[in-house]
Image (tube, rainbow, N blue to C red):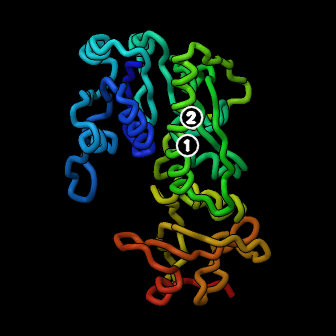
């Protein structure tokens, strides 16, 4: 089959490699290079870097928008039978959805209709879901609203982070894609309408979504911390002995349900870490990151900073 791939993030790399191995990849659509890092130097999307490494002969296009006329013309000239997208980060116009002669498919990192949108992996962990998975869906103009071709499930582990779950789903994606493409080629691919009334929606995670509200239950906050690892990281405020506060990224914490106190107060500091009270229970902060510095054990941070400890 003649296949076109659209993707940007590194979660799509295993699926891209699989399509390269099939020797049916016509071209790749990805986002433009963007400024990144402290010095704001241009950085290529992970998918572009992988294409240049494993299949430099494959045509690559990096438009600011897939709605541009030259993009639509380029796709029609390639005449794909199937278009596959994963973490592309742009909504495709009708002209591209209808361009493939057989199917336009999206690989989504959740079990639809649960967690439609931009942050399904983080949302699954934050919600305390027991399972996640990959959904292969037929693309439609709505956000993740298309009919389902198939899905593959995996359990979410007890201490799962967004990073570890993303890695596992990235490896599961080409397994699901291979089965989906075989069904399409055999003209046996099913279409199952989603139960739209069961849909939940996720958005992009910004600074506001990363902030820790200590009045929330500790169990909820522990899941939130894991859901924001390795990036962007949960940000919490710790009380300073001087009367102010200090912001730190919290990279890992242990749930302590039996401890209690005023939410946001430091209950104890010992070699294991900093124990902070929540709305219900407390969290023992293990690895944190002060502004402008690297990760460190919270106990080491406490030795160099005077935090207010509740009586």
Q: Is residue 310 above or below residue 287?
A: below
Numbered disc 2: secondary structure: helix
Q: Residue at x 69, y 68 (%)?
A: 278
Nearest the eye: 93 or 154: 154
> Which labelled disc corresponds to residue 124?
none
Distance, label 2 to label 1, CA atoms, is: 6 Å
Displayed quadrant of residue 159 = bottom right
**Which residue is under mark 1?**
172
Which residue does the image show at 58% across and 21% down from the upper left?
Answer: 183
Up-down relation of residue 90 to residue 48 (above or below): above
Which quadrant would residue 213 be assigned to in this image? Answer: bottom right
Q: Are marks 2 and 1 in contact (CB under 8 Å)?
A: yes
203 or 52, which lies in front?
52
The relative height of residue 231 versus residue 99 in the rendered view (above or below) is below
**Left or right: 41 with respect to 303?**
left
Residue to which mark 2 is pinned:
176
Q: Quadrant of the C terminus?
A: bottom right
Q: Residue at x 60, y 32 (%)?
A: 135
Question: Residue 158: image x %, image y %?
Answer: 68, 61
Q: Residues within 10 Å of mark 2 (few under 14, many from 20)?
A: many
> Which residue is at 75% across, 70% downward?
281
Considering depth in this image, is 67 or 205 the residue closer to the camera?
67
In which quadrant of the rendered view does residue 136 lie? top right
Quadrant of the snapshot with the N terminus: top left
Of residues 238 and 285, which is closer to you in this image?
285
């Amino acid at each position: 089959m003649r296949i076109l791939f659209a993707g940007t993030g590194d979660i799509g790399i295993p699926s891209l490699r699989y399509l390269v191995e099939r020797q049916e990849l016509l071209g790749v659509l990805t986002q433009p290079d963007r400024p990144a890092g402290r010095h704001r130097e241009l950085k290529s999307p992970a998918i572009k870097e992988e294409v240049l490494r494993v299949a430099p002969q494959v045509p690559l296009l990096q438009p600011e928008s897939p709605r541009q006329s030259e993009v639509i013309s380029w796709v029609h000239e390639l005449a794909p039978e199937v278009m596959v997208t994963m973490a592309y980060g742009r909504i495709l116009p009708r002209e591209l959805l209808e361009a493939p002669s057989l199917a336009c498919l999206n690989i989504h990192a959740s079990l639809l209709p649960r967690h439609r949108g931009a942050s399904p992996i983080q949302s699954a962990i934050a919600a305390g879901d027991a399972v996640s998975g990959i959904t292969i869906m037929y693309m439609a103009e709505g956000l993740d609203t298309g009919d389902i071709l198939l899905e593959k499930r995996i359990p979410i582990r007890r201490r799962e982070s967004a990073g570890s779950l993303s890695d596992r789903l990235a490896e599961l994606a080409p397994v699901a894609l291979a089965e989906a493409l075989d069904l399409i080629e055999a003209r046996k691919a099913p279409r199952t309408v989603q139960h739209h009334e069961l849909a939940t929606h996720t958005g992009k995670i910004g600074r506001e979504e990363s902030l820790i509200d200590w009045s929330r239950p500790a169990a909820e906050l522990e899941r939130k911390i894991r859901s924001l690892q390795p990036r962007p990281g949960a940000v919490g405020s710790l009380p300073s002995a001087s009367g102010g506060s200090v912001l730190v990224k919290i990279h890992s914490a242990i749930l302590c349900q039996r401890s209690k106190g005023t939410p946001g107060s430091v209950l104890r500091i010992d070699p294991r870490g900093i124990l902070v009270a929540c709305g219900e229970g407390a969290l023992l902060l293990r690895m944190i990151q002060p502004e402008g510095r690297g990760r460190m054990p919270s106990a080491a941070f406490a030795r160099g900073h005077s935090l207010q400890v509740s009586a």
